[in-house]
Image (cartoon, grey):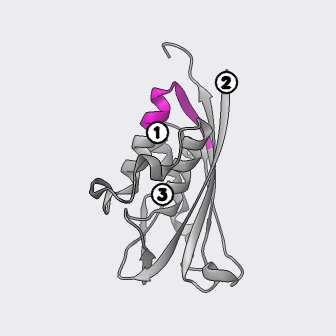
Amino acid sequence: MCYRIGSGVDFHQLVPGRELWLGGVQIPHDKGALGHSDADVLLHAICDAMLGALALGDIGMHFPDTSSEFKNIDSKILLKRTFDLVSSKGYGVVNVDSTIVLEEPKIKKYNTAMRELIAGVLGITADDVSVKATTNETMGFIGRKEGLSAYATVLLQKQAEGG
């Protein structure tokens, strides 16, 4: 079997008046991520990791922020479309390892929901999806609560013909 590994990263500003979406789950907070879509940094990083594993470019190439088609789009749709592209190339996801970097809010209680949602879209189990969180120890734009970031690593495996 052929394996491919990819990594992805995404950053967004935090601003008042926007919803905060992480891993496909809405998180109550007084600020949300600013972006052309719903600005879900975690799902965007996972998309980039899958695309990178197969040298298929990046999320901006496939879902440009200059296109009205993707204005305010639910990032779960982007994740599904990216997974469909990966599947069309004959690959499936083995596992996802990810980290969200933000000072607040604390997101531990949403971890299971994020893992289950991501796993459902990618056709794997929640045990195959790791979602971790850390702070930036009050340093930089994340430490000042001006933004957040996410990192993801995805392992893909070539699927057997006819299976």
Q: Residue furthest top?
A: 162
The residue sitting at 57% across, 83% down in the picture is 145
Label 2 sits on a secondary structure element that is loop
User: In the current view of this chain or complex, which residue is farthest to the left?
Assistant: 68
Residue 35 location in percent, x, y?
41, 68
Observer-side mark, 1 or 3, equals 1
Element assignment for label 3 = helix
Residue 15 drawn at (x, y percent) = 44, 81
Residue at numbered disc 1: 83
Quadrant (top left/top right/bottom left/bottom right) for the N terminus: top right
Ranked by sequence position, the earlier of labels 2 and 3 is 2
Closer mark to the observer between disc 2 and disc 3: 2
Neighbours of disc 1 within 10 Å: few (<14), some (14-19), many (20+): many
Residue underneath mark 3: 113
Q: Quadrant of residue 135?
A: bottom right
Q: Is residue 97 above or below residue 107?
A: above
Three-letter code for the amino acid on which mark 3 is drawn: Ala
Q: Secondary structure at mark 1?
A: helix
Looking at the rendering, the stretch of residues picked out in magenta corresponds to 83-95
